[in-house]
Image: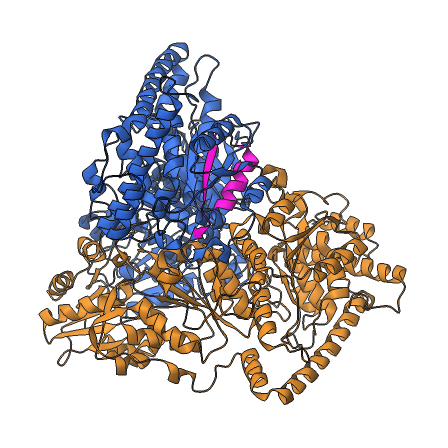
Chain colours: A orange, B blue
Amino acid sequence: MDDPAPERSAAERARLETLTANVIRGLAIDAVEKANSGHPGLPMGMADAATVLWGRFLKHNPKDPHWFDRDRFVLSAGHGSMLIYALLHLSGYDVSLEDLQQFRQLHSATPGHPEVHHTPGVETTTGPLGQGLSTAVGMALAERQMAKVYNTPEHVVVDHYTYVIASDGDLQEGVSNEASSFAGHQGLGKLVVLYDDNYIQIDGSTDLAFTEDRAGRYEALGWHVIRDVDAHDNEAVADALSTARNVLDRPSLIVCRSTIGYGSPNLAGTHDIHSDAIGAAEIEATKKNLDLPQEDFYAPDEAKTLFHEQAFRGSQEHCEWEGHMTAYAEADAEKAAELTRRIEGRLPEGWADALPTFEADAKGMASRAASGKVLDALAPVLPELIGGSADLTPSNKTKAAGMENMQFDTPAARYVHYGVREHGMAAIMNGMALHGGVRPYGGTFLIFSDYMKAAVRLGALMDAPVVHVFTHDSVGLGEDGPTHQPIEQLAGLRAIPNLYVIRPADANETAAAWKLALESTAPTALALSRQNLPTLAATAEAAADGVAKGAYVLADSDGEPEVIVVATGAEVGAALEAKDTLGAGCRVVSMPCDRRFFEQDEAYRESVLPKSVRARVAIEAASPLGWGRVVGLDGAVVGIDRFGTSAPGDEALEDLGITAQAVVEAARRVMG
Amino acid sequence: MDDPAPERSAAERARLETLTANVIRGLAIDAVEKANSGHPGLPMGMADAATVLWGRFLKHNPKDPHWFDRDRFVLSAGHGSMLIYALLHLSGYDVSLEDLQQFRQLHSATPGHPEVHHTPGVETTTGPLGQGLSTAVGMALAERQMAKVYNTPEHVVVDHYTYVIASDGDLQEGVSNEASSFAGHQGLGKLVVLYDDNYIQIDGSTDLAFTEDRAGRYEALGWHVIRDVDAHDNEAVADALSTARNVLDRPSLIVCRSTIGYGSPNLAGTHDIHSDAIGAAEIEATKKNLDLPQEDFYAPDEAKTLFHEQAFRGSQEHCEWEGHMTAYAEADAEKAAELTRRIEGRLPEGWADALPTFEADAKGMASRAASGKVLDALAPVLPELIGGSADLTPSNKTKAAGMENMQFDTPAARYVHYGVREHGMAAIMNGMALHGGVRPYGGTFLIFSDYMKAAVRLGALMDAPVVHVFTHDSVGLGEDGPTHQPIEQLAGLRAIPNLYVIRPADANETAAAWKLALESTAPTALALSRQNLPTLAATAEAAADGVAKGAYVLADSDGEPEVIVVATGAEVGAALEAKDTLGAGCRVVSMPCDRRFFEQDEAYRESVLPKSVRARVAIEAASPLGWGRVVGLDGAVVGIDRFGTSAPGDEALEDLGITAQAVVEAARRVMG
């Protein structure tokens, strides 16, 4: 692979690489000009290095972008999206010249920032800085785990690199430091980052805000760093990539000294070319400077030569890989079947039979404890489960029985200590989920979902099936006080499109929530209690279907309800207690997942919350925001629109008015 | 100051310091035991170093915790709260032994994590890791700015250090890397961090997840690092502090090699003592080991000796400072008055007269542009304004005319380039606001509020009057696509208690929003458009009062409304357009700030949204979550419960159904 085109002279390859890179530059400025929007600077600056990577090293098959053992390429600096679109087009992916001409237009294949599942060959959605690099760490981690589990001396079936192009902004974001520190700790040798060190960002020179020794930082983080590589010297870039690929005990950072907007006679090296169309005159001058014809979207076949050759080599390797998989199946049918199943993202048949059922129990258990028991039961039947926590393992109950610590020397293990790096954890989990073959979940306190918000959202946007285990889900956590007591987190998470927030009322709802989460292709956020919750008699039967529907009648009224009390999680207990006082006219609805409920058809929603019944009370130990659509203008919410308080949990709840008595009073009020 | 107790022998001082530190340890284990909750490990591990800092160096006056020129002390590792409570008690702050005995109890002065404005001597609320260290960066930045502006050769009136105790977790969080990189860039020499390098975190040894070269990282970030200081060798700690205090061109990190739970014979150095009560037997053994009597909450006067002496020195310095301030006023009355005003946090009289009024204009301007004009007008009259952006200055329009870049060699300047470090920016702004004397605001895109959520929340909890300038506030931003288009951010921010989210409809509402924000003691989040918004005729008169009330009737119906359309920001235009079609029965309400509106009395709310009118439509280009309480069960929301799309802004809005036509249709539907 290090010398993939021996039949061609070095000079000829150089000529072709220069042409290719310049064609990429031309496409970038043309597309940005046509859209009058976009970022030409990065594609122009990194065109050479990207051409070397995609022409000499990247293992991929444009005809099958989903081939499992392909190298992953992540353009962390997603604003430079025209770079990857040009690379995809020139490599033969299903990205046409017309698609490039539709850059940033409605419903086009070439949106403003690269989007996974939208454009073939895009591995992850990037744009929010720091995310791509951090997500790539997860991809490399998943690769290493599966390689260790499945490769045999005879059959190497998981063996690919993860390459990243990252920018100054990527390195400034804290999330990338978290993930990079983690990657260094884990020694992820097959992660190779090309850092576009161009001294320019939107506000101007990086001297304005970013004068740290970036290479030194990465060395301190345990990375193999190659300093001062001229990003416009293809042999230097190739040498650096070769070296990096051979350092297998540490991730590599190649510091590419590039000129932003390389090729533009008047704007190269300035921040004016970072994020704006450069105008017709400068396009003309640039094309002249680059020996390109004055032609819009010029992309001659010759500029595809090297990429097509690389793609051909990739397709051959893909064929060889298929052969290995066949031979593997002959050697070890069971393991091969498991690998195939994991690659295809299918859960094993009957897996859900392993889910525990919990008997009615007034003392009950914390839903975080129930979650731990569910994981204990699932870990043996789901080898793809990769657990972890941001240094709250004993509290989150995330380490399932039998899971060992995943470390550099135990890469096949399934439990990840992320350290106090919530944001990095979420991004790494996104990367694992996108890589495929593994199902990541990770724990922290619900309050610290705040730290990971950007990555949780990105996971929802990417349909990355991650399970976030958020424990200590209300002021009921007690003494840690307002810094640790979530108030608005449930509302904030529920507002994220495509994220399913589930707050189970007891152990059985918790098991049902896990079932739903693992069957989903979207991410799930579980909100679990620190404190004990009674295990209800009704849930052993009703929870599986009830949770799947998002809300269900847990304790019904005799006849038409006089009042409906809706509750989630721990507060279902208070709702039931209130019904004891309110009597037979009161219906109690458990609503573990509002998004699921509002996705049900109107008939089901009406069966749970009849439109005619306006006396409604919702109780949740959290911000009331969002409950208006359940209780309407005539109902009431027993919630908390202030910060919490440090005290034992039951005292905190009482002090903040989260009681059965408050429900009773609100119910009487709304019943008139 | 470096030799504050010359009258006492070194041996005697050592004896007293040991006693003091051991009393702190005893108080910590007793308080955690009594609460059966809390973290004894850090107070025990850092008791010696803290005793040296508080006994020999810290400039403060416990009798006046608000003295402006005091040193700031930040316990970034807030879980070790018993350390600071013990220090405060022993130093003579209004924190009694009874308060210590009420550790973590309801409404006590000693909550689970330290809370500013709650316990005297606590400078900032800590607990969420990484925040304290990052907040401290803001304090040091504010000190330097004011020192440069106000100090004269004759009168040094702003001259204090910011000290931090930070933990492994603090250093793992990305936010601290952002803020630390920024602090290194800025060369904040009067920031001194004691890093509690104890090799232990909750999951176990730091070897599980945190093997980077921390000292090396901080050196790469441009810090002065003192490695391998024995945290239990007081002279070594004192030497390090003296050295650090004298390095004035870089912040200092002192790597304190400590033993967590120092003094506990069986648990010291283990993670079992990190976060749990140690039990009666181990308490007994520990006290024996530390030569403490077997007495609960033992705090003899002798253990207060050194701290009281230091407090006395501080009170003398406070007196001297008062003298300097008096002399300063004699030398330069105007500047001294300005300094006093800033210290007291008062805006100058008549400042609001500088606010511009905008005339009706169909073309109008983007509200981000209006915000820029407001800042241009305010910057000259409000010298306390410190602006900035996370590398989106040209987009956020945050750099007011006349503002210069604040850098190491221009510390008096008022514009801060934070780099692509949103989270760090928010925490740094919190620190500036808590320091006092400055009013920070900072910009980024609304979508990237996600990155800063934890710090935004903490600012709201701390009542830190920061103004967040969030531009590009909807899918109307256009081509950047779903990674950059906020959907759920407004709902998420609105749910934060004590945060005022204001989304102005035009330039006049923008000016009114700034007025409100600057008059507030709570933080404000402004949501501002990228795209042009017409300047409305009605707002020049009505906006100031209307925005202050949160919502107001912008265009009324003739008589009782048949339908009420409620809108915010850019969508007010669509609401008014819908009224053109819907006719005289339609009332249009502009609701720039829901929190303000729901704080108004019922009469006002009824005057805007009469309970009897159930035909209500809300329109906002964002998640519908939260609008239920406005439109009820009989109304409708024109919102977006999916991710956005990359296209020119008007096409994106149309594609996602945010149109006047959609309002008209919804109105007709809800009117029956």
- Residue B545 found in image quarter: top left
Q: Is residue B300 left or right of residue A220?
A: left
Magenta span: B176-200
Note whether residue A621 is visible.
yes
Up/down of B12 relative to B415, above or below: above
Q: Which residue is at a point 21% across and 79% down the rendered structure image? A: A537
- Residue A2 found in image quarter: bottom right
B230 or B398: nearer the viewer: B230
Q: Which residue is at a point 24% across and 35% down the rendered structure image? A: B299
Q: Which residue is at a point 50% across and 75% down the rendered structure image? A: A384
B576 or B123: nearer the viewer: B123
Work out which quarter of the rendered image holds the C terminus of chain A and state it: bottom left
Name the spot of residue A488 as percent of width and height, x first.
Answer: 33, 56
**Count of marks placed on residues:** 0
Work out which quarter of the rendered image holds the N terminus of chain A and state it: bottom right
Q: Is residue B437 left or right of residue B564?
A: right
Q: Is residue A536 left or right of residue B318?
A: left
Note whether residue A51 is visible.
no
Up/down of B271 relative to A536, above or below: above
- Residue A664 found in image quarter: bottom left
Name the spot of residue B212 as percent of width and height, x first.
Answer: 55, 50
Q: Is residue B184 magenta?
A: yes
Up/down of B628 relative to A228, above or below: below
Name the spot of residue A660 as percent of width and height, x first.
Answer: 15, 64
Name the spot of residue A521 as percent of width and height, x first.
Answer: 47, 74
Q: Is residue B425 magenta?
A: no
Up/down of A633 relative to B322, above or below: below
